[in-house]
Image (tube, grey):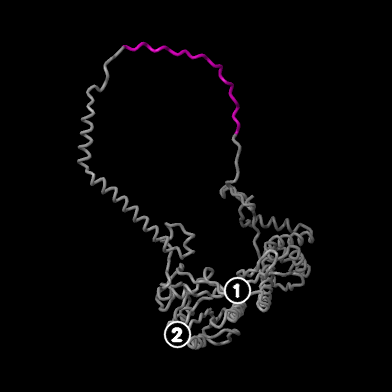
C-alpha cells in the first residue's frame, strides 16, 4: 500500500453498530394551568429620563474628544499603509528572483541573498551563455523545435545485447534486512538490519535449497534490484544477468549466494559505465550531424543564495560569492584579481546554476568575463582528480567551447604541469592564457 502511494492515514474503520433500544411507549403529558396573575397597572422605569441619557453621552464624547478618535483611526491607516509598502517592496525585490518564489513571505528575509553589483548589471541583462539543444525535426507531431538537451535523450538505441560483462566482484558484500511492521513505527513497513540469529537462520534456510534454486533465487533478487534502471529493457537485463551468472566460477557463485545485493551493485556500476559510454558516443555523433546544436540559453541570475559566502576577494560579480572554496580555488581567484583584463568573476553554484549539458552534466567552478567580452569557464582540479571523470569533463568542455563560438573558452586547471591530462593546463599556463584574452 505504501509503494502505491498510500500513507498510514489512508484507512477508515467502521464504527460498531450499537443494539437498537426499544422505543418507550408514549405517554400523554398533562400541562398544569398557570395560576391567574393579579392585575398590575403599575409600569416599571417610570423615572426613566431619555434626555438625561442623551446629555450623558454628549458629555463623554466631549471628554474623549473627536481628535483622539481621529488620531486612533489615522494611526491604523498609517500602519496599514506601511504594511502595504513593505509588501510591495518585497514583491518588487523578489520579482526577478525565481529562486525566492518557492519560499513563504515570512521565510524570505531569512534566506541569504546577494545581488549583482550595479556596475555589472548590464552584463547580466544581455549575456546568454550557450547550452546544447536537441533538434526535433518537423513531423506529424511536431513543427520542429529545439529542446534543452538532457543526457537521458542520448540513450536512444542503447542495448545490453553483446555488451561486455567483465566485472570485478571482489569486495562485494551486503547485509540481510527484514521488512517488519512495528507498532512504534506507526504501523508502516520499515527495513531493519536482521539480527545475527535471524541472519544465521535465513542463511541456513537458503543453503538448504538445491543449488539450482539458490542460483535462481539470487538472479531474481538481482533482477528486481536492477530493474529500476529506466534506460534498460527488462528482457535484455534478465538475459544480461543470465550471461554473467552463467560464466561465474564456483568461488563467484558462492560469493553471489552470500551477497546477491552486493553483486547487483557491481552489475549496476557496469551498466552505468556502458550507458555513459553510449551517451558520449551518441552525443559526438549527433553533434557532428547537427542533431545537437549550441544556442544562447542561460542567463545568470540577478540574485544568488549561497549556503556560505565570502566577500574578501575583489572583482566578484555579486556583492558576495559562494564561500566554500578549497586552497586551489582560492589561489585561482587571487590570480584572477591580479589580472587587469578580467572584468568580473563568479563562483558558479553547483547543481543550481549554469551547467554544460551533454553526456554528463558539468557545473564548472568559475565563470569569468574579460573586458574584451570573452566568457571563460574554469574548472580547477587537484592532483588526485586526474581520473576518468576529469577526462569526460575536458572532452565535454572542449566540445562546448568549439560549438559555442570564438567568444567562449573552457579550461581545466591543475596546480602544476606534471603529467597533465590531455586538454588540461597548469595554473601558470592558465594565467598566461588569460592575460592574452
Give the extent of the magenta segment: 16-38
Foreground of the two, 46 or 342: 46
Which residue is label 1 attached to?
132
Location of mark 2 (residue): 341
Magenta segment includes 31: yes
Our reading of the magenta stretch's main secondary structure is: loop
The crowd level at tag 2 (other Cα within 10 Å; few <14, some 14-19, many 20+) is some
**In the displayed structure image, the side of residue 39 where residue 307 appears, left or right:** right
**Residue 200 at x, y = what percent?**
68, 57
Asked whether 370 falls inside the magenta stretch, the response is: no
Judge left or right: residue 320 versus residue 145: left
Q: Residues within 10 Å of mark 1 (few under 14, many from 20)?
A: many
Q: Identify whether 15 is placed above or below 280.
A: above
Task: Report the front residue among 154 and 251.
Answer: 154
Q: Answer left or right for 420 relative to 201.
A: left
Name above or below for residue 278 compared with residue 257. below
Amino acid at each position: 500500500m505504501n509503494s502505491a502511494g498510500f500513507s498510514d492515514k489512508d484507512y477508515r474503520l467502521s464504527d460498531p453498530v450499537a443494539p437498537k433500544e426499544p422505543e418507550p411507549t408514549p405517554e400523554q403529558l398533562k400541562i398544569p394551568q398557570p395560576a391567574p396573575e393579579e392585575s398590575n397597572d403599575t409600569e416599571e422605569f417610570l423615572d426613566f429620563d431619555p434626555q438625561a441619557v442623551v446629555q450623558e453621552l454628549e458629555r463623554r464624547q466631549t471628554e474623549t474628544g473627536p481628535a483622539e478618535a481621529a488620531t486612533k483611526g489615522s494611526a491604523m491607516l498609517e500602519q496599514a499603509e506601511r504594511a502595504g509598502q513593505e509588501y510591495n517592496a518585497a514583491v518588487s525585490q523578489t520579482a526577478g528572483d525565481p529562486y525566492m518564489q518557492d519560499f513563504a513571505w515570512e521565510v524570505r528575509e531569512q534566506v541569504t541573498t546577494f545581488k549583482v553589483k550595479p556596475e555589472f548589471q548590464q552584463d547580466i541583462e544581455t549575456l546568454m551563455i550557450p547550452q546544447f539543444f536537441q533538434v526535433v525535426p518537423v513531423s506529424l507531431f511536431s513543427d520542429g523545435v529545439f529542446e534543452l538537451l538532457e543526457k537521458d535523450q542520448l540513450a536512444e538505441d542503447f542495448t545490453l545485447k553483446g555488451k561486455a560483462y567483465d566485472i570485478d566482484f571482489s569486495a562485494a558484500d551486503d547485509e540481510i534486512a527484514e521488512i517488519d511492521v512495528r507498532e512504534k513505527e506507526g504501523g508502516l513497513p520499515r527495513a531493519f538490519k536482521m539480527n545475527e540469529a535471524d541472519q544465521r537462520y535465513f542463511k541456513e534456510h537458503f543453503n538448504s535449497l538445491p543449488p539450482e534454486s539458490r542460483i535462481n533465487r539470487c538472479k531474481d533478487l538481482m533482477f528486481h534490484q536492477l530493474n529500476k534502471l529506466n534506460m534498460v529493457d527488462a528482457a535484455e537485463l534478465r538475459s544480461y544477468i543470465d550471461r554473467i551468472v552463467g560464466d561465474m566460477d564456483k568461488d563467484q557463485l558462492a560469493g553471489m549466494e552470500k551477497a546477491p545485493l552486493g553483486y547487483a551493485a557491481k552489475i549496476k556500476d557496469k551498466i552505468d559505465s556502458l550507458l555513459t559510454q553510449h551517451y558520449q558516443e551518441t552525443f559526438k555523433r549527433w553533434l557532428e550531424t547537427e542533431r545537437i546544436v549550441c544556442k544562447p540559453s542561460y542567463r545568470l541570475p540577478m540574485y544568488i543564495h549561497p549556503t556560505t559566502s565570502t566577500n574578501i576577494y575583489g572583482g566578484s560579480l555579486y556583492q558576495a560569492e559562494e564561500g566554500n572554496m578549497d586552497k586551489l580555488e582560492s589561489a585561482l581567484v587571487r590570480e584572477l584579481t591580479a589580472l587587469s583584463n578580467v572584468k568580473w568573476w563568479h563562483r558558479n553554484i553547483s547543481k543550481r546554476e549554469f551547467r554544460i549539458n551533454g553526456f554528463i552534466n558539468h557545473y564548472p567552478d568559475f565563470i569569468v568575463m574579460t573586458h574584451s567580452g570573452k566568457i571563460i569557464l574554469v574548472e580547477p582540479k587537484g592532483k588526485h582528480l586526474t581520473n576518468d571523470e576529469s577526462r569526460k569533463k575536458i572532452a565535454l568542455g572542449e566540445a562546448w567551447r568549439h560549438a559555442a563560438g570564438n567568444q567562449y573558452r573552457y579550461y581545466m586547471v591543475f596546480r602544476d604541469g606534471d603529467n597533465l591530462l590531455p586538454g588540461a593546463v597548469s595554473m601558470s599556463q592558465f594565467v598566461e592564457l588569460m592575460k592574452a584574452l
